Image (cartoon, rainbow, N blue to C red):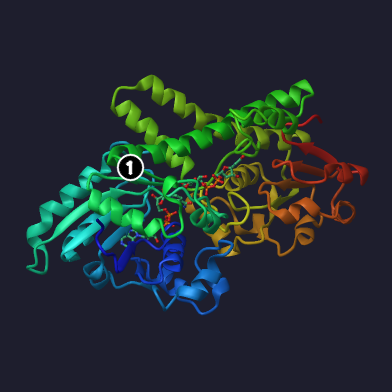
Amino acid sequence: MTIPIKKICCIGAGYVGGPTMSVIADKCPDIQITVIDINTDKIKAWNTSDLSKLPIFEPGLSNIIKRCRGKNLHFSSEIKENIAEADMVFISVNTPTKTKGIGAGEAIDLKWIEASARQISKYATGNTIVVEKSTLPIKTGETIKKILEADNSKNSTKIPRRFSVLSNPEFLAEGSAIKDLEEPDRILIGGEDNLSINSLINIYSRWVSRNKIITTNLWSAELSKLIANAFLAQRISSINSITALCEITDSSIKEVSNAVGSDKRIGDLFLKAGPGFGGSCFKKDILNLVYICNYYGLNEVADYWRKVIEINNWQKDRIVKIIVKNLFGNLSEKTLTILGFSFKANTNDTRESPALDICKKLLNEGANIKIYDPKVSEERISMDFNDDLSQFKRDKWEKSTTIYEACENSDAVIILTEWNEFRVIDWEKVSLIMRKPSWIFDTRNISNLENARNYGINVWSLGEVE
Ligand code: NAD
Ligand code: UGA
């Protein structure tokens, strides 16, 4: 038995809400889906006729928007009506780390989740299945249920209402969101109410085989999402911790990673060494796990997971120290070329990007920097620098429009994001326009550095023999 779902509303038109609802709309033409957001500029951007100006860049997204928008996929700022009409409401709002008060720096700020629950409570009519799509601390479902049920008396209609809460965490990665949504490794649904669970299964099973849909209790689903992210981040810190050892023992991180990852029990994914993991979620989700463990008195477990973040910070510091040391301990009056500003390739997202931290440290050393990134806008970079740093003067950095413009008169090229175009740089051309002695620091191990060496450029490659 299932409840027929004719209308879905998704609260939050961000990196998760936008692509997730686009794929559901594409796969379920009979369901009307509206994504709502309090940010009216974002909604305007989702409705733009110029598809290159959508608020987020994801390969394959604009094609789906073209197919579905205005048919069964809508983006709107109209909150009341869309919640009232929905049979199912997804909550896909931001859940950042708290910046003040109890748990600041670790716990999740549930302000936006609570506001969403109150909106649903106020406007929902009839039976509503509420789906947690955001990544949440374990037991948040309980809070949502309490808010939904407590406010029942205040609803604007007199129709009796019934709520059911499910956890359906999202595992998409940015840059491959559409592929991840279309061909997921698994769909996880946690809850107690079989009728609601079956209704959500009914949606996903249009394109995901039933054996990939895992059902659990609500708390296991909430916790599994945090743990999946913690495990992925832990692998990156593990391999990054070994880069330093490789550099001093004449071994190669690429070779070690390949040899270790060839063991089926270990697997070869998420073993690429780099400048540290970025993105909006790994750090905040591990910090949240640390907070939860300490809250329940599991201090050793908390310390274990905190180390994953400490190694991540250590890696960024280490890279900056290596750059400074090789440039004679002094960056003032020097120009550095930054290739890649997003936290990974194929996205314009810069949240927690290692490039941002590394650039700030280089600017602090007095360097001038020229940044090239194929998708991150100058406006975004400016906002990132100004978020907490009024001391970073605008004349100390500039955004370049090509790789080669960014390399003009530069002392060092620093590759921080693994964009494909950085794999095929014409190092001969670069060697002619850089200041001597010239350096390349490749923190992603993607460039043809042998070739660069042949043109007289000094080369440092993460975790490789110098
Ligand atoms: P985001 O910041 O890109 O988007 C969240 C949106 O929610 C914002 O546009 C915001 O304006 C809107 N919002 C907040 N409160 C609202 C309210 N009361 N009513 C209407 N709109 C509201 O965040 P995101 O990256 O999409 O992440 C959302 C959640 O999904 C987080 O919990 C995150 O941990 C999780 N997640 C993110 C990713 C990812 O790749 N970004 C992947 C999996 C899970
Ligand atoms: C990550 C997870 O992969 C998703 O499953 C999850 O849904 C999402 O977080 C989330 O909850 O937000 P995302 O952060 O978009 O996705 O991107 P990843 O591909 O995981 O990369 C994260 C960071 O790790 C990037 O900075 C990337 O460059 C780095 N990374 C990744 C490495 O340094 N080495 C690797 O081998 C893999």
Counting from the top left corner in percent of width and height, residue 230 is at: 46, 35
Q: Is residue 102 left or right of residue 248?
A: left
Q: Circle 1: is it few (<14), some (14-19), or many (20+) Cα within 10 Å? A: few
Counting from the top left corner in percent of width and height, residue 249 is at: 76, 21
Q: Is residue 384 above or below residue 217?
A: below
Q: Is residue 285 left or right of residue 82?
A: right
Counting from the top left corner in percent of width and height, residue 374 is at: 66, 61
| In the foreground, 140 or 193 | 193
Quarter of the render that holds ligand 1: bottom left
Q: Is residue 398 above or below residue 367?
A: below
Residue found 71% across the figure and 65% down from its top = 401
Q: In which quarter of the view is residue 266 placed?
A: top right
Q: Is residue 145 left or right of residue 401?
A: left
Counting from the top left corner in percent of width and height, residue 19 is at: 47, 61
Residue found 60% across the figure and 53% down from its top = 342
Q: In which quarter of the view is residue 1 placed?
A: bottom left
Residue under label 1: 100
Q: Residue furthest front?
A: 1
| In the foreground, 38 or 381 | 38
Query: Can residue 349 be seen at all in this image of the molecule?
Result: no
| In the foreground, 373 or 134 | 134
Disc 1 within 8 angstroms of ligand 1 (CB): no
Quarter that holds the C terminus:
top right
Q: Name the kind of residue labelled 1 in the image.
A: Lys
